[in-house]
Image (spheres, rainbow, N blue to C red):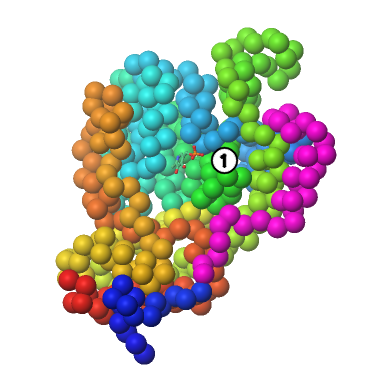
C-alpha cells in the first residue's frame, strides 16, 4: 500500500465524505409546514410549548424555557438568579467565550478556575480555591458532553452556598449516575447552534425544577410579562428572546433522533478509545464511568508532541486533515486572555491545565462519530500513517 502522506501528494486514507451535519428528513419538513399553516410563526406557536415539554421530559426536568441562543440563556439564568454588580461567578477558562462573557454581560465578575487535565471540566479543588466572600455561583461546562463531577461539585456548592448553573451547551442527553444533566444544579443552559448535537441553526433552552425560577426565566425571555398576566403588563424587566415556531419544529424533529445518535456516538467513541489506548502521546478525555451517557459533542484528545518526535500539533493536525480526518485544535488560548475578560474585568486563579490544553487539544467533531463503526478505522489508520511518517514531516 502507498504509505505516502496525503499532505505530500499521497492518496488520503479517507476517501468517502463523513456524515453531514445538520441532518434532517421529512419530519422537519412536516413540522415546518405545520408552523407555516398555523399562521402564528413566532414564539407563541404551539410548536414551542410542544418542544419545551419534550425537551424537559427527556432531561427529567420539570420546566423548560427556550430562547434565541445558548449565550442569552446563560445571561438570562444569571439575571433571574439576581446575580449582578460586584458578584463573582466561577467559570472555566477552557470553554467558548459565552460561558464567561455572560457573567460580564450582567455586570458580575468572572473568576477563572482551572480545569482538570484529564476531563477538560472544571476542577472541583480549583473551584474551592477560587471561592471568596463575593462568590455567588459556579458555571460548570460539561465539556465535550462529559458531565462535571457532580458528586464533588454539588456538596461543595452547598457548603459554600453557591448556585450551580450548568452550561450544558455540549451535553444534550448526557447523564450522571442515570440522571440527565441540565436540572441537577439550579438551572441548566443548552445551545442549539448549528454544530450542536441538537440544532435548529440557532436556539437555546433553560431547564430547572424550581417553579419560581422557571417563571422568572420565562418573564425575562418574554418582555417582563408573567405567564398568567396580560400582554401589556410588564411587572419585570425583560426583553424579547423568544425562540420561533420554526426553530421549535426543527428541534422537535431532531429530538426524536437524539437517543439513537447518542448511542452511536458513544459506541464509536469506545472503539476509538480502544485504538488510542495503544498509542503513546494521544490521550483521549477520561470518561468517568459515572457519566453513563456522554454526548460526545467533541471527541477530545491530548496530543503530546514529545511522543511524536516534537512534531508541532499544527503539523500533526494539518497532516490528519490532508488524510480527510477533519481534526481541530479548538481554543487557541484561555479566555482570560480575550480582551473583554482580562483582569480587572475578571479574577484569574492559576490555570496551568487550561494553558496546557490550549496547546495540546486535538478534537474531532460529533458528526464523525455518526459514521459506521468500521469507519472509525479510517481515523485510526490516518493517525498510524502520520505516526509512521513523522520523519518526513519534520
Ligand atoms: C460551552 C458553550 N456555552 C455556550 C455556548 C453559546 O451558545 P450559542 O452559540 O447558542 O449562543 C456555546 C456555543 O456555541 C458553547 O460551546
Q: Is residue 282 visible?
A: no
Direction right: furthest residue: 37
**Closer-to-camera residue (278/307):** 307
- 338 w.r.t. 305: above or below: above
Q: Position of residue 263 (x, y in %)?
A: 58, 62
**Closer-to-camera residue (124/97):** 97
Which quadrant holds residue 338? top left
Q: Is residue 150 visible?
A: yes
- Cβ of mark 1 under 8 Å from ligand 1: the answer is yes
Q: Check disc 1 and report its element: helix, strand or loop.
A: loop
Where does the magenta region start and end? 17-45
Which quadrant holds residue 226? top right
Direction bottom: furthest residue: 1
Q: Position of residue 382 (x, y in %)?
A: 37, 75
Q: Name the residue under label 1.
A: 202
Side of 333 relative to 65 (left or right): left
Give the crowd class for mark 1: few <14, some 14-19, many >=20 residues within 10 Å: some
> Does the magenta segment cover residue 41?
yes
- 307 w.r.t. 296: above or below: below
Q: Which residue is drawn at 49% across and 58% down?
A: 366
Q: Residue at x 42, y 48 (%)?
A: 143
Q: Residue at x 77, y 35 (%)?
A: 46
Amino acid at each position: 500500500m502507498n504509505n505516502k502522506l496525503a499532505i505530500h501528494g499521497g492518496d488520503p486514507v479517507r476517501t468517502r465524505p463523513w456524515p453531514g451535519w445538520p441532518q434532517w428528513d421529512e419530519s422537519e419538513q412536516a413540522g415546518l409546514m405545520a408552523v407555516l399553516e398555523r399562521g402564528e410563526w413566532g414564539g407563541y406557536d404551539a410548536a414551542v410549548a410542544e418542544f419545551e415539554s419534550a425537551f424537559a421530559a427527556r432531561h427529567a426536568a420539570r420546566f423548560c424555557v427556550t430562547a434565541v441562543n445558548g449565550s442569552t440563556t446563560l445571561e438570562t439564568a444569571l439575571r433571574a438568579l439576581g446575580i449582578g454588580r460586584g458578584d463573582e461567578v466561577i467559570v472555566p477558562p477552557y470553554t467558548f467565550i459565552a460561558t464567561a462573557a455572560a457573567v460580564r454581560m450582567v455586570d458580575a465578575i468572572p473568576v477563572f478556575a482551572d480545569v482538570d487535565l484529564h476531563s477538560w471540566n472544571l476542577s472541583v479543588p480549583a473551584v474551592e480555591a477560587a471561592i471568596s466572600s463575593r462568590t455567588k455561583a459556579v458555571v460548570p461546562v460539561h465539556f465535550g458532553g462529559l458531565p462535571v463531577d457532580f458528586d464533588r461539585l454539588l456538596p461543595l456548592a452547598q457548603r459554600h452556598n453557591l448556585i450551580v448553573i450548568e452550561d450544558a451547551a455540549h451535553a444534550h442527553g448526557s447523564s450522571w449516575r442515570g440522571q440527565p444533566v441540565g436540572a441537577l444544579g439550579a438551572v441548566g443552559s443548552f445551545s442549539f447552534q448549528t454544530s450542536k448535537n441538537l440544532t435548529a441553526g440557532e436556539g437555546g433552552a433553560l431547564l430547572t425544577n424550581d417553579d419560581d425560577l422557571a417563571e422568572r426565566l420565562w418573564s425575562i425571555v418574554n418582555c417582563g410579562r408573567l405567564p398568567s398576566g396580560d400582554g401589556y403588563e410588564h411587572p419585570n424587566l425583560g426583553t424579547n428572546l423568544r425562540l420561533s415556531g420554526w426553530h421549535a419544529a426543527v428541534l422537535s424533529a431532531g429530538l426524536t433522533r437524539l437517543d439513537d445518535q447518542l448511542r452511536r456516538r458513544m459506541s464509536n467513541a469506545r472503539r476509538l478509545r480502544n485504538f488510542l489506548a495503544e498509542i503513546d502521546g494521544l490521550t483521549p478525555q477520561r470518561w468517568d464511568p459515572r457519566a453513563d451517557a456522554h454526548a460526545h459533542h467533541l471527541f477530545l484528545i491530548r496530543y503530546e508532541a514529545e511522543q511524536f518526535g516534537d512534531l508541532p500539533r499544527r503539523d500533526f493536525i494539518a497532516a490528519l486533515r490532508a488524510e480527510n480526518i477533519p481534526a481541530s485544535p479548538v481554543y487557541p488560548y484561555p479566555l482570560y486572555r480575550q480582551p473583554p475578560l482580562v483582569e480587572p474585568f475578571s479574577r484569574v486563579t492559576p490555570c496551568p491545565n487550561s494553558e496546557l490544553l490550549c496547546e495540546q487539544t486535538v478534537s474531532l467533531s460529533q458528526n464523525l462519530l455518526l459514521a459506521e463503526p468500521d469507519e472509525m478505522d479510517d481515523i485510526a489508520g490516518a493517525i498510524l500513517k502520520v505516526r509512521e511518517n513523522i520523519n518526513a514531516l519534520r
